[in-house]
Amino acid sequence: MDARSARPKGIALTDRQRLAWLRLIRSDNVGPATFRDLINHFGSAETALAALPELSARGGATRSIRITTEAEVQRELEIAHRFGARFVGIGEPEYPQALRQIDGAPPLLAVKGNLAAVAQPAVGIVGSRNASISGAKFAAMVARDCGRAGYTVVSGLARGIDTAAHRASMDTGTVAAIAGGLDQPYPPENAGLLEEIWDGNGLAVSEMPFGWEPRARDFPRRNRLIAGISLGVVVVEAATRSGSLITARLAGEFGRLVFAVPGSPLDPRCHGTNGLLKDGAMIVTGPEDVIEALAPISQLDLFSAPVAEEPDHGSGASMMPPDESDRSRITDALGPTPVEIDDIIRHTGLPASSVYLVLLELDIAGRLHRHPGGLVSLAMDI
């Protein structure tokens, strides 16, 4: 099947579901992975919201969990409407197809602009904020040619390489992943560029609330959006310690292609990209390298797995919680070292449903750390 012509699959949320989803993801201790587990267990966001206080108490929380109110969410929805934005759920047709498949995909994305930009295959282009003239020109050339070949260009609205990639793909389609709220672009100097993107053939996406000013820890979350939306990521100039390398690492973890542009060993801006090449990234000396490598996978319907939706009722919603003895066995099996959930099940000898429920209780209580690869550990600082 040709992915370019494949009709997006999904089921639209009702207004009531969208409100409940937004309340749940905005509540304390509920991240994307926890959100997914809650929906899987309880069957709906509304049921999960009602269960949060009890889950938190059983998990040993020392204070009441803050649950976002309906009034707070209504205000955010009104702000989004006035801003010309909307929220798209992970199971809806307009949600980026490739992003659905990654671990910890955002349940809801705030979007503004042309949603057609995420209906075609995408390539990420990232790199140094302090880009050289030649680096910016090369990034623009790759972005322009990839756009002409039918790819949307995804980047992070940063200075340097990101800006060059966005500007070069403005006519063919570009996606700006925002670290803060859609109304809080960073850097502020690119606010005008962002307006050009969503007023034209581009789209802005964010998982953060309106009014949220980006902090340092928000940028890796933004980077996972770039890697998740794209079939491959091209890195043009990146220092050894660079956010672009985080994007490249995430792309590799998600099964995406990783491309790197070689540079002078004497230029610190190229140490990271040269390191990627040593580690097996695909070398890029021209746009055709990217286009030819992506062609075979962009023609396949790789990302149209069954869509996420709320079932009529959750299989575990009515299950009796484990007794205190079982709960202690599971908690005692945890420590500060990340472990696989399957190992916890084997170690305790308890049913998987009991283990998952206790982990969910600890998570809601703020006593569980989630790690890449589905690993978990006990939060020892609580």
Image: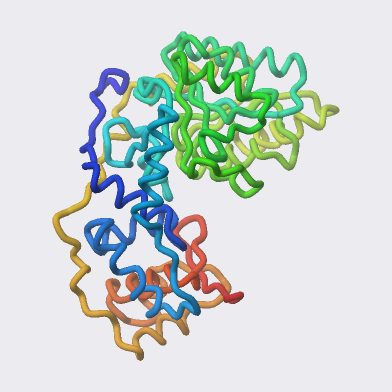
For this rendering, which residue is in front, 38 or 14? 14
Place of residue 70 in the rendered image (x, y in percent of width and height, measured from the top left): 34, 54
Position in image of residue 116 (x %, y %): 35, 20
Relative to 35, does residue 357 appear above or below in the rendering?
Answer: below
Total number of numbered discs in the rendering: 0
Seen from the viewer's position, the closer of residues 17 and 260 is 17
In the rendered view, tell whether residue 89 sits above or below residue 83. below
- Residue drawn at the location 24% of the way across and 42% of the way down: 15
**Taking the image as drawn, is residue 52 in sight?**
yes
Where, by quadrant of the figure, is residue 143 drawn? top right
Given residues 273 and 58, the one toward you in this image is: 58
Considering every residue shown, the one lying at the far bottom of the view is 325
Q: Residue at x 38, y 32 (%)?
A: 81
Q: Is residue 355 rendered to the left or right of residue 231? A: left
In percent of the image, x 38 and y 43: which residue is there?
108
Viewer-proximal residue among 321 and 77: 77
Q: How is the image coloured?
A: rainbow
Q: Residue at x 41, y 19 (%)?
A: 295
Please, which residue is most extreme toward the left here? 312
* Rendering coords of residue 99 (x, y %): 40, 38
Asked whether residue 223 appears in the rendered view, the answer is: no
| Residue 105 image position (x, y, % from top left) | 41, 45
Q: Quadrant of the C terminus?
A: bottom right
Q: State whether residue 19 is above or below residue 191.
A: below
The quadrant of the rendering that contains the N terminus is top left
